[in-house]
Structure formats: C-alpha cells, structure tokens
Amino acid sequence: MRLSRKSGAKSVGKTAASIIVLAAITFTAPAYAQTGSSQNSEAAPTAEDAKNFVAETEKKMFDYSVDASRVYWINSTYITDDTDALAAKVGAEGTTMAVQAAIDAAKYKDVQGLDPVTKRKLDKLRGGIVLPAPTTEGAATELNTIATKLNSAYGKGKGTLNGKEINGSDIEAAMGTNRNPEELSEMWESWHTNVGAPMKDDYARMVEIANEGAEELGFADVGAMWRSGYDMPADEFAELTDKLWAQVKPLYDEVHCYTRGKLNEKYGDEVQATTGPIRADLLGNMWAQEWGNIYDIVAPEGAGDIGFDTTQLLTSKGYDATKMVKAGEGFFSSLGFEPLPDTFWKRSLFTKPADREVVCHASAWDIDNVDDIRIKMCIKVNGDDFVTIHHELGHNYYQRAYNKQSYLHLDGANDGFHEAIGDMVALSITPEYLVQVGLLDASKVPSADKDIGLLLRQAMDKVAFLPFGLLVDKWRWQVFSGDIQPAEYTKAWHDLKLEYQGITPPVERPADAFDPGAKYHIPGNTPYSRYFLARILQFQFYKAACETAGWTGPLHRCSFYGNKEVGAKLNKMLEMGASKPWPDALEAFTGTREMDGSAMISYFEPLMDWLKEENKGKSCGW
Ligand SMILES: [Zn+2]
C-alpha cells in the first residue's frame, strides 16, 4: 500500500500498514458510475472513464496519504494507547480505500483504447494489495482475522534456552553470539516448533481465501499478482531472478565452502562435517540468512584490524547526531543535490527522547509528498549509525527527486530500487571517503592487504543473503500456485534451503511442523523478492557511479564523493520515480536496461580469488 512508502531501512515490511489486509468492503455501484463523469451507468466504460477514475483515485489517495503519514509519524514518535488507536483507524481506512480501488481498477482493465500511462496505473491499483480478499460475504473479515492472528502469534512467539523461555528479539540476538552447538540447536528447534507449527492450518486457509481474491482481480493466484509489479509477465520475472542468481552463485559457493571449513575447524566433524550442507544453527542467524555475526570464526588472520575505527574517529572529532546527519547531507550536496529543507532539521527525530516511547527503528519519511521529508532514528555516535544515516537519506533524496510525479508514480522504479539507492550510498563510505570528509587522516587509509578482511565481512552478510532472498518467494509462489500443498509446506521449505543455500536443519523435522512460519515475513505476508533485487542492484548502481566518476582502482575502494556528473545521472533516474517501466529508470543511470549481477562479482573479485586459493583441495558444494 502507498502509505508504507515511508520505507524504513530496516523497518521494511514491519510497518503497521503493510502487515494487514482488508477491511470488509461491499461493492455496489459500477465503478464508472463513481467517477463523476456524465456517462450513463448502463453503458460500457470507456477509456475516458478509466482516465477519470484514475485521476480521482490519485487525488483521494494523495490527500489521504498526507493525513495518514502525519498520524503514523506521531504514533511512531509518541507511542500511547491513543496514538495506537488513531493509527489503527487510519490503517483500516487506507486498506478499505486500496481494496475498493483495486476492484474498480479491475473493471477497467480490458477497456479498449486505454493510453499506456492509464493502463499501467490501473495495473498498479489492481495489483497493489498484498493479500486481496474476495468479495464473497464474510471473506474479508475472515482473511483479516487470520492475518492479524498470524502476525500477532509471531510477535508473541517464544523459544527456549536451557529450558527457559526466551522471546523473539532475545533469541535472535543469542543466535548471533552463542557458540555452544547444543544450545544453538535447542534455540533453533524450539523457535521453529513453537512459533511455526501452530500457524499451519491458518496459513493454509489464508492462502485459499487470498487466492480467490486474486482471481477476482484477474490474476492466476496471489504469487502471480506479486510478480506482476515488475513491468513484465509474471513468468519472465521468475526467470529473471533465476538468471541473476546464476550469475552470483559461484561467489556464494566459495563463501559457503570456506565458511563450512572454518566451522569444521571450530566445532569438529561431529557438529559440522567438511562436506555436505552447513548446519543451519551455526551461522549466527536463526534463518541462516546473513552470517556476519560469525565473522570472528571466519576472519582471516591479520586482516581483522583495518587500522582505524569509525566510531573512534567520530568521537574524537566531536561529532554528535546532528553533525553526523550534516555529513550525510554533505555527501548528496557534493553530488549537486539541493540541501535538505529547514523542515527536515526541525521535524526529524535524531535522538531517543528521555520522556516518551518511540519506535527507534531507523526509517525515512515523506509526509506531504512534496518536501516535508524526515528521518526518524535514535542515533548513537558510532560507525554503524553513520552508515545507516547515509542509507536513510538515500530514501529521502529519492522521495524528493520524484515529487513532481503523479501520486501512483511517487515510488521507486520497482520495489528493489528504493533500498538499493540507500545501500549504494552506504557502500560509498570507504576509507577514501572518510579522508575526503576530514574524518580520517590520509596516512591511515588501510593498505590493500587489509582488503580481504573488509570484503569478507561484507560478503558474510551481502553474499550469504542472496539464496535466502530468492527462496522465500520461490516457496511462496509455489504455495500460492498449489504446487506445494499444505502437507508438504515444511519439507518443501527445507528442500529449497538445501538446494539454494546448502543448509540443513540441526535436527529431524516432524511432519506436522510449519518451519516457514518461524520467519517473520511469512506470517507477516511481506513479499521478499525486493530484498534479493536490492542486493543485486546496489552493486550495479555503485559500479555505474564509479565508472561515471572515472574510477580506475579496485571497485570496493571507489568513492564518487564530489562528482557532479554522477549526481546529475543519478537524479535522472530518481526523478522518474515509478513513472516509467523500471528498465527505463535503470538505463538513465547505468546505461543498461538489464538488471545484472556482474557488478557484485567485480566488487568481490579480490575476495573471490582469495577464497578459491583457500578452498583449493576442498570438495566444495553439497
Ligand atoms: Zn532503507
């Protein structure tokens, strides 16, 4: 839904608006009778009617989104029972509006003589609901009840550690730091069993209802509806993601092989063999999706210390929250972007207030769809938050760049783009950049022999994530299409994890388990392909920027700070928003119309060479 456009870096998919589905709606009058046109309601709708319908819907949604954003902002920066109630009310109104618009849009989809812009906007309205309810009596209520129940079951989920209950955020943290294989296994198993299994029947019922809703809107099933948002036929999109995966898989395979060897050295053959898949609970993450938490286990000797610490640099130069954000603004100013408006500095939340509850999770907001952009963060003076600030500002500059577009085009070119911009900017925080902004002394720039450590740390998160980012929706697409039936839910999930990630559960899984439910985005119903795309795109954007800047050194050391030509090209892509098919936007910045994983391969090239050397003589694969 549009109002989740306040796309927070790490909060993506966790905003209230995106979680739940559909308030009950009844459709009575033919859609074209509501457009205010003078058409006789008996007549078939015309292209003109469709155009009017889109214009009126955009106006209504624009106005709604401004009010809704203000309510959500207040709720997130001042959490009380009252602001929770207001946010829930506004959310329900938005859902009703989106559902009505989708149903109306479906009625115009086959009208003859639609202009391409109207056609595309109708498709956006029609396909813009995550979980569509059918119009049959009671279906919307049932779907909404199930979706709410699944979401809250996840939120209340508990695992155990040494037999004692442990909640979701604590168990997640413990999986990152605990190095005891029995305890890791206990946490993994208890979490998957306690959280997932009770959801199974509800999930299966939810799939049935939502599929009926998708069919009413003219889609084969919900998965096809999700894949429809990429300016290409649903099947071609699936093929595109496979093609991208094939490009980056060789790099993943080397990281997998190297990591497996290190885990074997640490834990021994009993726990982790030198061949076959990796035990899922040993990788520092409940879902084995990002492995950065076990960097200490895999770190190459001598490359761990890069000779400086960003946190210490920030502290010694007297940076506070505002000064850190100013530095982030400076990055964009150096590319030629206008400074942030005064309202940004007055209305953003930079630090955690002492006297009230707020949502500290970093996010970027666009309140009025024009210039009232803000970030909301509880900034601490450290290197991680310095990177996050650059990332969030990437969202804000994107939002401002496309503010001349009509409502349905106020968005990224596809849902992978918004995150990728922020991440591209975050990749640019290289030691060389820190020198350029006066944080690091030029003599302290780490020498090339530290590169492997820097790159391996990045790869443990960014490369390790790729197969997981792909398989979550591979599983869901097959569930929605009926290729995976409820009796096979868990087996199919682990089959995919084995095939793509080379990961295996630490213990045998019972037939009545529902292990996919133990990952938030499944009960939360958040599409996942966007995260896979964002990982690929951020490197593609970064490489294009570095080429424009004339960078000739190793890609991972490139800084395009201060390059106005990069800024101008970037702006060309950003200002298009979602107004054109995404290949047009991609071409404006990178010169190519294809999403391409080869930039990621270039970035990690020195690591790839090193890993191949390290893995020599091992039997890689699983
Ligand atoms: Zn983000």
Image (spheres, rainbow, N blue to C red):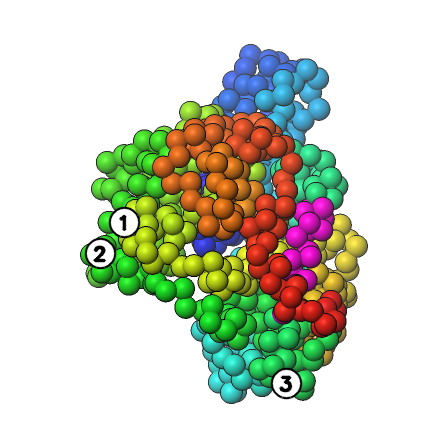
Q: Which residue is mark 1?
A: 438
- Quadrant location of the C terminus? bottom right
Ligand 1 lies under 8 Å from the Cβ of mark 3:
no
Q: Is residue 127 left or right of residue 153?
A: right
Dot 2 falls on a residue whose secondary structure is loop
| Residue 418 locus on image (x, y percent) | 49, 42
Dot 1 falls on a residue whose secondary structure is loop
| Residue 82 locus on image (x, y percent) | 32, 53
Magenta region, main secondary structure:
helix
Query: What is the distance, in whole Å, between disc 1 and disc 2 at their CAs?
Result: 9 Å
Q: Which residue is mark 2?
A: 317
Q: Earlier in the sequence, mark 1 or mark 2?
A: 2
Q: Amino acid at mark 1?
A: Gly
State the extent of the magenta-drawn residues as a range.
241-258
Q: Local crowd at mark 1 within 10 Å, few (<14), some, or many (≥20)?
A: few
Q: Out of 447 and 388, give the one closest to the viewer.
A: 447
| Residue 19 locus on image (x, y percent) | 52, 52
Q: Nearer the viewer, mark 3 or mark 1?
A: 1
Residue 268: image tag: 3
Query: What is the distance, in whole Å, between disc 3 and disc 1 at their CAs?
Result: 46 Å
- Does the magenta run of residues contain 581? no
Residue found 35% across the figure and 41% down from its top: 331
Up the image or down, 551 lies above or below 354; here it is: above
Q: Out of 126 and 31, give the one closest to the viewer.
A: 126
In the rendered structure, are the residues bearing label 1 and label 2 in contact, judged by CB atoms less than 8 Å apart? Answer: yes
Residue found 63% across the figure and 46% down from its top: 597
